[in-house]
Image (spheres, grey):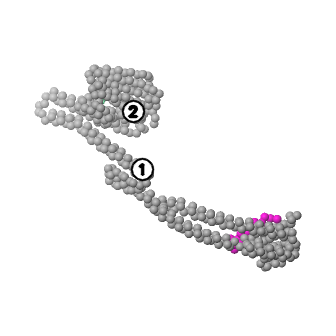
Amino acid sequence: MYLILIFIILGIVPLLFFSYVLLNTVVEKQINNRITKIENQGKVLSNKLNVSTYLATGDDDDIDKEVTRLADYFEGRIIIVNDNLKVIKDTYTLEDGKYLISEDVIKCLSGGSNTPLNNDKTQYLRLTYPITHNNSNEIMGAIVMSFSTKDIGIIRDSMERRVQLYSITLVILIVVFAIYFSGILTKPLTNVVNSIDRMTDGYRLDEGIAIKGYNEIEKISDSFSHMINRMQKLEMSRQEFVSNVSHELKTPITSIKVLADSLLMQEDTPVELYREFLLDITDEIERENKIINDLLSLVKLDKTAGDMHIAAVNINELLELILKRLSPIANKQNIEIIYESFRPVVAEVDEVKLLLAISNLIENAIKYNIEDGWVRVSLNADHKYFFIKISDSGIGIPEEAQDSIFERFYRVDKARSRETGGTGLGLAITKNAIQMHHGAIKVYSKEGEGSTFNVRIPLNYIV
Ligand code: ADP
């Protein structure tokens, strides 16, 4: 609706304005032409009059004829007055011998400018021209010339009618054009809106949207499809996550229930068996606890970047702290930890999140290692980034699994991961934390030979 209005305003208003201006310009030009012509004739006549005695006597047939011819030629009236305002000659013979007292004549005789009077109503043009003495420049009288501009008026009227006709035709065309085009323009948009409404009502993300229209609408439709695809993927991953979470949380509880039930079902259970089963139950509770903690870390990391507590942190000290904490686990498997630092690094990071990310990587390097193996941690930096490299002599990751290990709950070997207390959330947490620092993580691994995780994080945090 607004579109139609805009079309009409943009099309019609300038049209009417320009035709009005054009018409007036043409008429004005015609009138000016007429004035110039009459003025020239007036000048010629005045030159003749100032050398004759006509102004004093009114006797001169030649001049009489000339004046009458001129008046006839312009279809008008010429009155000649002397400096006493006495009418010497009136081609209409109405004022002959009388006195012509009018503002323009008095002004003209006293040397004032002779602006032409154009009377639109009577369609007459009146021009007063002074007769000046050849030598003394003294004003001897005035020629008052009134001429009809009716012919110009007729032309103006006919032009006006024609312009009106053209304008009306054009207005009709513009209105039809506006209605037609606003329909074409808004139809694809209406389709997009309808599709969106249908999806909102039924939440049918799979329906999609495919609108063929003009370019921009197609682009909107494409972007919308893109967004829907992404939402679909997110929805799927959300559902998968929820089902994974419930499965993972249920497993320890099921074990606890089985252990407790079997204790209850047996009569005269020996105390040793109680102890053994209760130890198993405690293990399962610990596992449940770990899953919940990991999930909470992940949820916290999923929040916005506004949750980052950025401070200048000495990365060398941070790595030393992590290694000190993890060395008891490494010692258990007799794994040697080698730490190399190429330079002191201080970076703007969220210490808690980075500690969690790097701890997970080093813990994995220990967990998925072989007896008497090694883990090498190195720290380096350039002017923009710092790099942490964690290599191990462990079991490695099969090529086809390397893309998936950062997914939540993904584990290459479920049994082994479970044995080592893994939840499948560690690397997802790590990747999230690194991404929140605008960093990157890459894995290089060969099954049976070991793995290397490369982490790159900017030295200065960019919001
Ligand atoms: P988990 O809690 O099971 O360790 P992660 O998300 O930390 O979960 O790791 C996902 C999976 O990637 C692990 O289950 C393991 O199979 C594999 N993985 C991670 N790090 C290593 C490594 N250094 N060497 C071999 N496999 C690894």
Q: Is 70 or 462 nearer to us in this picture? A: 70
Residue 118, by quadrant, is: bottom right
Q: Residue at x 26, y 31 (%)?
A: 417
Image-based side of 69 in relation to 287, left or right: right
Please state which amino acid type lies under the numbered disc 2. Ala
Q: Is 324 or 165 nearer to us in this picture? A: 165
- For label 1, being within 8 Å of ligand 1 is answered no
- Bounds of the magenta segment: 111-124
Image-based side of 262 in relation to 107, left or right: left
Which numbered dot is residue 219? 1
Q: CA distance from mark 2 to mark 1?
A: 32 Å
Q: Residue at x 28, y 35 (%)?
A: 410
**Depicted 418 relative to depicted 45: above or below:** above
Q: Is 378 or 424 nearer to us in this picture? A: 378
Residue 196 point in image, percent of width and height? 37, 53
Residue 353 visible, this orientation: no
Q: Residue at x 77, y 78 (%)?
A: 92
Which secondary structure lies at badge 1? helix
Q: Is 276 or 241 nearer to us in this picture? A: 241
Mark sitting earlier along the chain (2/1): 1
Q: Residues within 10 Å of mark 2 (few under 14, many from 20)?
A: some
Q: Residue at x 84, y 66 (%)?
A: 132
Image-based side of 224 in relation to 160, left or right: left
Residue 249 point in image, percent of width and height? 26, 37
Residue 120 lies within the magenta run: yes
For disc 2, the marked residue is 440
The C terminus sits in image quarter: top left
Furthest toward the front, the residue is 62
- For label 2, being within 8 Å of ligand 1 is answered no
Furthest toward the left, the residue is 267
Which numbered dot is residue 400? none
